[in-house]
Image (tube, grey):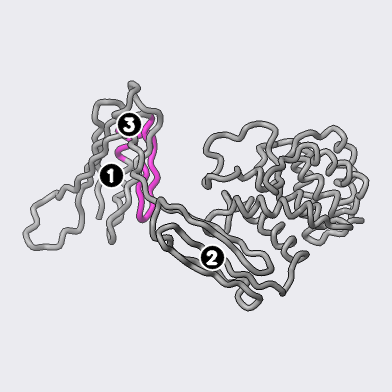
Amino acid sequence: MKGGVEDDISLSAYVTIALIEGGVPLKDPLVRDAVSCLKKAASDVTNVYTLALLAYTFTLCGETKFRKTILDKLEKKAVRGDGQLHWKRDSDPPKKDSYWHRAPSAEVEMSAYVLLALLHGPEPDLVETAGIANWFRKQQNPYGGFSSTQDTVMALEALAKYSELTFSDKGDVTTTVTSSTGFLEKFHVDKNNRLLLQRATLPTVPGEYMISATGNGCVFVQTVLRYNVPPPRRDISFSLKVTPHLTRECLGDPVTNFEILISATYTGTRDKSNMAIIEVKMLSGHIPVKSTVKKLQKDQLIQRSEIQMDTVTLYLNQVGHDTINLSFMVE
């Protein structure tokens, strides 16, 4: 769950939704007792994320009275503006909660649960839900998804239900994009191509563009800006050097084994590091000589090791500013 909650009520509501959507009958003791538990706890719930889960739970199980009570609470916490409607968490989300610069995952997910609750009700309010659907579309990334897997699944499920209830095979719209520099691009949308993605490249960025539409119907227009930035500089905490060393000169015979020399140094700001792991991937066709790896542990140069056919993992309690030299054989 994306809401950052760990209480029993949220988890119970989440599981109850899964049971009902999975086909478990409402009369089943598991569902019946879970709903009974949630009804007793619902009056004290104030967390928006938990309220959203409860709204959908009570909708699925037909608890009309409790559903209305929860939706009334959510109505007071709704965020409205510019023809949009959504819900925010009670506290500010942590920084970098969203890969996409739009709403954090939890806000998309909780708004999806409310939208599903409104759409699955006895009398879906398509005017109210239009504001939520409009907000969702402004949060979508260029690929049609959202910040994470979970909020994408919930938002698309809610939008699919909304589309099902508002579907119309009528409509004929022409959308025109122009600029002061003479750019002109027209997109025509009718019932034959309404599911087709149409796109064009804007010639000048930055630039000022105007969008206009004529006809009857609904179209979704999105602009996408992509650019590259250099990666941020990072302080490197370790210096690592790996050198293969032949145990004898190659005189034309195939070399069947050689020694791998590893030099590791901590370069961070502290006196020494915490536990460090050195993972050595084998060259194709070679395997480690186990006795030489185990000798490192016997000589107390490492804490322990793990040996696989293609990888040797060396565990060190710490690495200091003085270079640690390790070596083992491969064949």
Highlighted range, magenta: 295-317
- Depth check, front residue: 12 or 280: 12
Q: In screen coordinates, is 171 left or right of 102? A: right
Q: Is residue 111 depicted above or below 44 in this figure?
A: below
Q: Residue at x 15, y 50 (%)?
A: 246
Q: Position of residue 186 (x, y in %)?
A: 52, 69
Give the foreground label among 3 and 2.
2
Give the crowd class for mark 1: few <14, some 14-19, many >=20 residues within 10 Å: some
Mark closest to the chain's N terminus, 3 or 2: 2
Amino acid type, callout 3: Gln
Quarter of the N terminus within the rendering: top right
Secondary structure type for disc 2: strand
CB atoms of marks 3 and 2 within 8 Å? no
Mark closest to the chain's N terminus, 3 or 1: 1
Q: Residue at x 33, y 36 (%)?
A: 233
Q: Position of residue 109 (x, y in %)?
A: 67, 48
Secondary structure type for disc 3: loop
Q: Which residue is mark 1?
A: 292
Q: Which mark is residue 176?
A: 2
